[in-house]
Image (cartoon, rainbow, N blue to C red):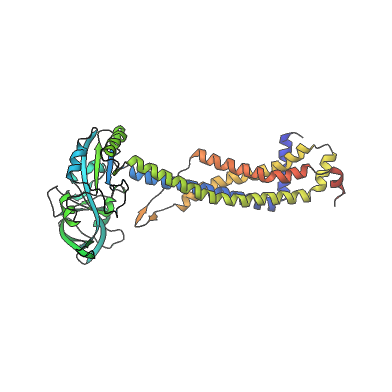
Amino acid sequence: MNPLEIFTYAFEALRERRARSVLTILMVVISAALMTALNGMNAGMENYFISQFSSLSPNVLVVIPGTKTGRFDITSSAKVTLDIHDVENIRKVEGVEEVIPLIQGVAVLRSGVRTLTVQIVGFDQSKIHYIYPTVELEEGSYVSPYDSTGIVLGAYVANPPGAERTFAWVGQVVTARYDYTTTNQFGQLERETVKRSFIVRGVLKYTGAPGFANVDRAALVSLQAANMLFRKGGHYDAILVVTKDPELNEQVEKRIVDMYSRNVAVISPKAIVQVIRGAMAGFSTFTVSIAAVSLVVAAVGIITTLFTSVLERTREIGLLKALGFRNWQVLLTFLSEALIVGLLGGSLGVAVGDAGAYLLLMGPVKFGLRTVTIQPFFNPVDLLLIWAFTLAVSLLAGFYPAWRASRLNPVEALRRE
């Protein structure tokens, strides 16, 4: 018999044991589908997060203060601070186009009897498009650098999702309360509260970009107002550095780090994307590895099915050998059965997993307080690898039973009932 005839013979053998064959193939389908669905969902989430940061300007670097030891610890008493002198020094660095100091903190906004805990960010809003090129006002205007009472609300602050009515509108007065602790002369911690009233100057359109601050759930004020609210004493939480060209990012970053003897951290959107990709790659490997365990169970099913088939067909194998079948032909016959199981299970599994990922991610997905829509993403190479891996495991699982069948003595086999 030639290989094609052997393959056809193996297919007929599986058809004769239809129920057992279908269950074995089903195990392979479930395993391949699980790996495919998880792979597509993970890739979709990675693409979503990266697309969110792609809305930021690619030529923006964030300078964050560290400590005098070069470590970045927000609890350190020896923390290096950033102020107006640092802004001027960084502005002189070659390749820098603009420098934007920033102060941020979490405060409670009150509008009438309702309250919201929001992130308040203070910076020169005339330069907002350096940071968020796509941000737009829904209504009103931005706050001027000298306006200490104006505030701009993010889309979800002005109109909280699920709320029956608007939290605040343009022209309304809102109150910000900031609680913090200080150390008195006796070394004891004391709780202090700062309250400031603001007039809503504008409301932003929804952006969906987390960035340095999730502007949809943030409130924007002037640098002066943030300094007074958060009691910063002229010190900044970060300095945003706009380079003349994204290609200059690494050079500017190195110059700033060298200038501060590595006492500051410089973060770029590219670095954030790399972190996201690294984290998602690890997460994807973990989840797909768990799914691959189910393929081991399917492999055990293939081994069991073929071993049972060998036992049931012992006399048939003996007869085939008596008629002139060689060992390799018997081996190929049973391997063909494993191959068919792998081909059908892998192909159906990839298709089912593809559809399953879309069904699982159908509609909005909840991420904390945010509701987002994520589309699965399938790389053809990944799908091919999953299919090939399923096929390889099926063949490996079928090899030992096939080898045992090929080694049967035809005389002994024909004697068995």
How far across and down, in percent of the image, does residue 203 sit? 21, 52
* Residue at far left of view: 146
The quadrant in which residue 403 appears is top right
* Residue at far front of view: 186
> Does residue 30 appear in the picture of this structure?
no
414, above or below 96, in the image: below
Name which residue lies at 59% across and 40% down.
Answer: 388
How far across and down, in percent of the image, does residue 193 sit? 20, 63
Instruction: Name the quarter where the N terminus is drawn.
Output: top right
166, above or below 31, in the image: below
Name which residue lies at 62% across and 42% down.
Answer: 391
The answer to whether 330 appears left or right of 227 in the picture is right
How far across and down, in percent of the image, does residue 372 sit? 37, 52
* Front-most of residues 281 and 341: 281
The quadrant in which residue 240 appears is top left
Tally of marks: 0
Name which residue lies at 46% across and 47% down.
Answer: 282
24, above or below 271, in the image: below
How far across and down, in percent of the image, does residue 296 sit? 61, 50
> Does residue 334 appear in the picture of this structure?
yes
